[in-house]
Image (cartoon, coloured by chain):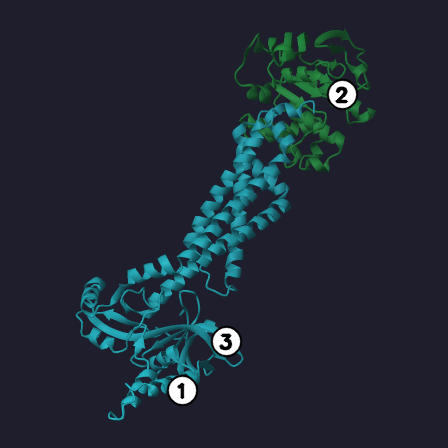
Amino acid sequence: MINLAGRDIQHAWGKFIFTGVGLGLLIGVTLTMAGVYRGMVDDAMVLLDNSAADLWVVQKDTLGPYAEPSSVQDDLYRGLLGMPGVARAANVTYLTMQVRQGERDVRAMVVGVVPGDLGQPGQPRYLVDGRHISRSHYEAVADVTAGFSLGDRLRIRRNDYTVVGLTRRMVSSGGDPMVFIPLKDAQEAQFLKDNDALVQQRRRTAANPAFNRPEVPGLLDAVIASQSANPHVNAVLVQIKPGHTPDEVAGPIRRWKRLQVYTRAEMQEILIGKLIATSARQIGMFLVILAIVSAAIVAFIIYTLTLGKIREIAVLKLIGTRNRTIAGMILQQAVGLGVLGFVVGKIAATFWAGIFPKYVLLLPGDAVRGIVAVVVMCALASLLAIHAALKVDPAEAIGG
Amino acid sequence: MHDTGIRVEKLRKRYGKGDTAVDALKGVDMQVSPGEVVGLIGPSGSGKTTMLKCLGAVIEPTDGRMTLGDEVIYDNGWRIKDLRALRRDKIGFVFQAPYLIPFLDVTDNVALLPMLAGRSNADSRKRAMELLDALDVGHRARAMPSQLSGGEQQRVSIARALVNHPPVILADEPTAPLDSVRALAVIRILNQMARQYETAIIVVTHDEKIIPTFKRIYHIRDGHTHEEAGEGRTFE
């Protein structure tokens, strides 16, 4: 038996190809939106992976350093190192800000990490060029997407930093590239006041008789020094010893240190379930609308193509063609159009995903789900056209 | 070889119900023998198209009896079950416009019917080629319908009507778009094929050019048929 759908496509291949390409671009946008969502989730997961932490110790009653401001003392890590099951503990600060390089600036997440002692949680896990931070001040390691090169000079607040290393896929949950600097510099940058504010603060302190007591020399200087220093960090990242579970290590820290401790699973829930949830729903809505629009367009195209063949369908029915043969022809064409559209869309999405400013992750699993959805969508969309074709009266071929 | 061609007795067709009912056919009789070509003529609204649709098993008559070859198709409200298969196997259609399937080439336009009837592709194409050769369009076998002239298209549609060797062919204004020469050529082909394949052919027409060629003519007027002898002119 002749494949009627195939012959029809072969006969009007130009129309079919152009329609498929048009549909494909729409499917490409849909796949890209899915990729944008996956990229957001992956950015969040990468943030957790790259911290190399098993536990996040943060200020009590806060959601931790990524979702809410958190401040803990910078000597807390010493006490944590003495807790059962703790292998390593390191201070870390996170600060999203504009990093200047000459005339341009880059939105980045500045991460303060303990320099040296490689393998400490929070440090960049691997470099693609250069070296790790080895000095306590004015060195930086940047993600390549920030656009910096080795030796570049960056300005963060009032200090200049030299890029000594480059890393890859070190981004915030919002997709901003990370710039790692020494912890002390980051602490200073986080609460750095301008000069006028410092002068005003010193004047006020000196004017306070409680701090400026003639009978206690050096008190005023000590108070001013304590006001100028920042002894806080955003979190302490903890790695646990083999043989311990995160929950059994987290329990005593919560109890004895009166701090909030999150395991990796809990932090993942905060990042994905809370931090990017609204964006994910936004993209999800967009995906649903795109899918509906795509289905409507496929239905419209197939319906229009079928209406253009009403006379041929009437003749086919008159000469004894089964309804299922005609329905099969329309269904095959709809599915063929969908498959062509998917291939075009997949190629287009793969091509343009690389030029998006944020990470777009096109997963093979999403592609499989996509092709299944497209085939189902096209099959459903063809029902309208099949209904119209089956309603065609073979008598239409006779007598006009 | 078909023994009895097509026979219609007291065929009636009523559209609508009650006060708005219209009797399009009011008990028509017709009999066409194998190998015979008859004309069915009448003014607009006389019931020609309704008659053709009933004969073509496209619509069901309200009443009356119709036999095709040895098979009873309708009998006073009863009808055979599978009208689609009947149209495929026992009735050939030739339309005013050829209505070839535009995305199939000439051979497959003709071979499609036997394929639909379950014959193999090779056998179907062989039968199609025999007919196309007989109708002198074999040399255009691989052409698409859009590449054929109007006369060639009509010959291909005749081949399509004949390919399953049906006992009856219904031709609906087959010469309307053609000039005299081509119209007479189509009628000559129909006569030739009717004789060669022992097929009864009913030609519904308004075409004054071809009416003198019929040996028998059924006039249809106000839902009734009147049979009369035609001139039966030859056109060698």
Task: Report the residue marked by disc 1.
Answer: A199
Indicate the chain on which mark 3 is placed: A
- Tag 2–tag 1 contact (CB < 8 Å): no
Q: Please state the chain letter of the residue tagged with numbered disc 1 in the rendered image.
A: A
Secondary structure, mark 2, is: helix
Q: Amino acid at mark 1?
A: Val
Residue at the disc numbered 3 = A105
Chain-order first, disc 3 or disc 1: 3
* Residue B183 screen position, x and y as percent: 79, 24
Tag 3: amino acid: Asp
Coordinates of residue B141 in the picture (x, y in percent): 67, 34
Which one of the lettered chains is coloured cyan? A
Task: Give the percent coordinates (x, y) of residue B110.
Answer: 64, 29
Do the residues indicated by labels 2 and 1 lie within the same chain of the protein?
Answer: no
Distance of mark 2 from mark 3, alpha carbons?
87 Å
The residue at 43%/85% (across/down) is A195
Q: Is residue A385 above or below residue B36?
A: below
Which residue ends up furthest to the front in the rendered image?
A209
Of marks 3 and 1, the one in the foreground:
1
Q: Chain of mark 2?
A: B
Badge 3 element: strand
Q: Amino acid at mark 2?
A: Ile
Residue at the extreme left of the image, as rendered: A84
Q: Position of residue A219 (x, y in %)?
A: 27, 89
Residue linked to disc 2: B187
Q: Is residue B5 visible?
A: no
Distance CA(mark 2)–CA(mark 1): 113 Å
Q: Give the drawing colour for chain B.
A: green
Q: Quadrant of the C terminus of chain A?
A: top right
- Label 3 Cα crowd, 10 Å radius (few <14 / some 14-19 / many 20+): some
Looking at the picture, does residue B150 appear above or below residue A10?
A: above
